[in-house]
Image: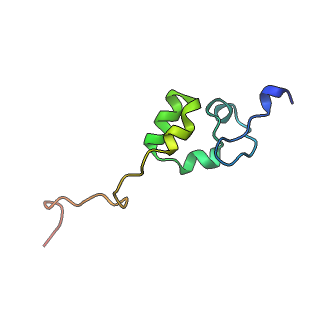
C-alpha cells in the first residue's frame, strides 16, 4: 500500500477501501447513513464533510403525507 491508499473515513476514522470512498473521504457504511442533502454537499466538495454533517435533519418523520383523494372512506 502506498501513502495515497491510507485514507480514513472522516466520520468513523476507519480505513476506506473503494476508490469512490477514498475520493469522498467517507466510508461506505457511513455514506449510507447520510441524508441525500448531505451526500450532495460532499459530492460537490469532499472537504466539506463536516459542513454537511452540521446541516439539520428534516423535521419530517420520514412518512409522506397522504393526499385526501387517495384515502378511501
Q: Position of residue 38 (x, y in %)?
A: 48, 41
Q: How is the image coloured?
A: rainbow
The quarter of the picture where residue 9 lies is top right
Residue farthest along the right direction in this orientation: 1
Q: Quadrant of the C terminus?
A: bottom left
> In this rendering, would 41 be left or right of 31?
left
At x 79% / y 34%, what residue is drawn? 6
At x 54% / y 33%, what residue is drawn? 48
> In this rendering, would 40 be left or right of 63?
right
Q: Position of residue 44 (x, y in %)?
A: 50, 27
Q: How many marks?
A: 0
Q: Quadrant of the N terminus?
A: top right
Residue farthest along the bottom direction in this orientation: 73
At x 48% / y 34%, what residue is drawn? 41
Q: Is residue 68 above or below residue 50?
A: below
Q: Is residue 54 above or below residue 21?
A: below
Q: Is residue 29 above or below residue 6?
A: below
Closer to the camera in the image, 53 or 32: 53
Q: Is residue 61 above or below residue 26?
A: below
At x 52% / y 31%, what residue is drawn? 43
Closer to the camera in the image, 36 or 55: 55
Q: Position of residue 46 (x, y in %)?
A: 58, 30
> In this rendering, would 41 be left or right of 23?
left
> In this rendering, would 57 be left or right of 2?
left
Q: Position of residue 42 (x, y in %)?
A: 53, 34
Amino acid at each position: 500500500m502506498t501513502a495515497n491508499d491510507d485514507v480514513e473515513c472522516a466520520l468513523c476514522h476507519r480505513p476506506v477501501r473503494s476508490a469512490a470512498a477514498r475520493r469522498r473521504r467517507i466510508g461506505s457504511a457511513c455514506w449510507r447513513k447520510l441524508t441525500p442533502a448531505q451526500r450532495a454537499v460532499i459530492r460537490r466538495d469532499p472537504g466539506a464533510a463536516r459542513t454537511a454533517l452540521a446541516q439539520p435533519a428534516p423535521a419530517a418523520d420520514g412518512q409522506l403525507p397522504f393526499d385526501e383523494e387517495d384515502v378511501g372512506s
